[in-house]
Image (tube, rainbow, N blue to C red):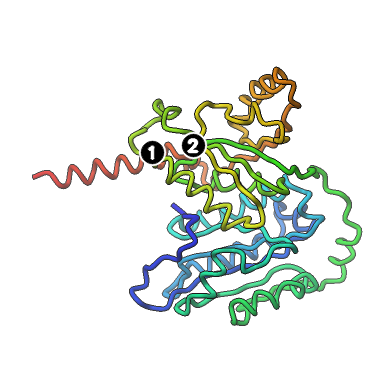
Amino acid sequence: MGDSNDDTDERNNGRKEFVGVVVWCVEEIDLTNFLSSGHSTLKLVGNWCSEMLKGENAVSALRIFLNLTDETTTHIKQLELLIGELYKSVEDVTADILFDVLIMTCEVDLRSYPFVKKIVDCNSTDVKLAFFGSDDEIDKVEKEFLDCFGVPPQLRYGNNDEALKTKRAKQNDIGNSIVKHEHVCLGGTFDHLHRGHKLLLTGAALICSNTVHVGVSGDELLTKKKHADMLEPLAVRMGAVKMFFNNVAPHLNTNIFELHDPMGTAATDGALTCIVTSMETQGAISAINEARLGRLLLPLDLHVVPLLTSANDDTPKISSSLIREMLKRKGNDHASNSCV
């Protein structure tokens, strides 16, 4: 599966490693058009990423920076759908790659991303750099990336189309705008962190202005999980969540802690104002808010992140239980082959 580790993959036997960096300066018009059947920037980004994953000089790690403006950061639902599509477009080509979608705003220093710092410090890495968006927005960020990586972009897809500029200027509020919360919470097992987890955690980052509080289920809550013997240790699961936020949203504070009961601090912490959940688990939030009301605390706002669906209807939805089942089967096959 794709990994959130900021360490690049040593798979080239001493040869120079290729890493892909895509910078997409997202505008409001991108968020209204990306799911349409017509030609869109999403298609262009997806096609470019697919090309970087092929051939002898294929990249072993890929990061897509979504450079967001004050306007685009308020349209969370569209951003979540867009990020989900990006994960699908890359992982439908190959899951065997280090890949994440990173959030970038004007107040975030590029060198604060561990992924960037490692590339800057590593002389054995070649960067394949590409920019997408309007020329005006690309101009605002291009110098910082060029200073960090010291390479010219292989592709700069800027759009100066006058009709498009007019459409941007007339763009109305596209709805689903969400006020950011200082303290956001969510919980889960986060076993074998996969793209569904990544979208959930990114959804929390998008609506948070200060600290994301993440409860990770302790072992006593997981005894009835399918293939529980294949679960990652708690420290590994907590570390994966922490590393993901460090890589994707280094401007945010995080509070990662062990969950000893299903509600955790969501039912008792008055500083929390919003809880993030998937469509599958949102029904459990009413019990948390009832518990808060019993303690004279305001109920939590509910932010529901969309589910990731597969482009192939025959492909089962990615889940930790499916990953554990695959690992279990692989282990059993290996044991069988080892028998005389």
Q: Residue at x 57, y 56 (%)?
A: 246
Precedes in sequence: disc 2 or disc 1:
2
Which residue in the protein does label 1 denote? 231
User: How far apart are labels 2 and 1 at the CA level?
Assistant: 9 Å
Q: Residue at x 46, y 71 (%)?
A: 58
- 28 sits left or right of 170 in the view: left
Residue 303 vertical position relative to residue 201 in the rendered view, above or below: above
Indicate the position of residue 283 as horizontal and vertical percent values: 63, 25
x and y, in percent, of residue 313 in the image: 52, 42
Look at the numbered discs 2 and 1 and tell me whether their residues touch, using CB distance below 8 Å. Answer: yes
Q: Give the residue type at disc 2.
A: Thr
Check the picture and name the quadrant holding the C terminus: top left
Along the line of sight, the residue nearer the viewer: 116 or 174: 116
Q: Give the vertical position of 273 relative to 327 (above or below).
A: above
Tell me the residue at 64%/44% (across/down): 212
The numbered mark at residue 213 is none
Tell me the number on the disc at residue 189. 2
Q: Residue 322 in the image: state x and y as whole percent.
A: 42, 39
Q: Mark 1: which amino acid?
A: Leu
Dot 1 alpha-carbon crowd within 10 angstroms: few under 14, some 14 to 19, many 20 or more: many
Confirm whether residue 192 shows in the render.
yes
Give SS at disc 1: loop
Residue 193 position, x and y percent, is 48, 46
Q: Toward the viewer: 41 or 134?
A: 134
Question: Is 67 positioned to the left or the right of 7 in the image?
Answer: right
Name the secondary structure under disc 2: loop
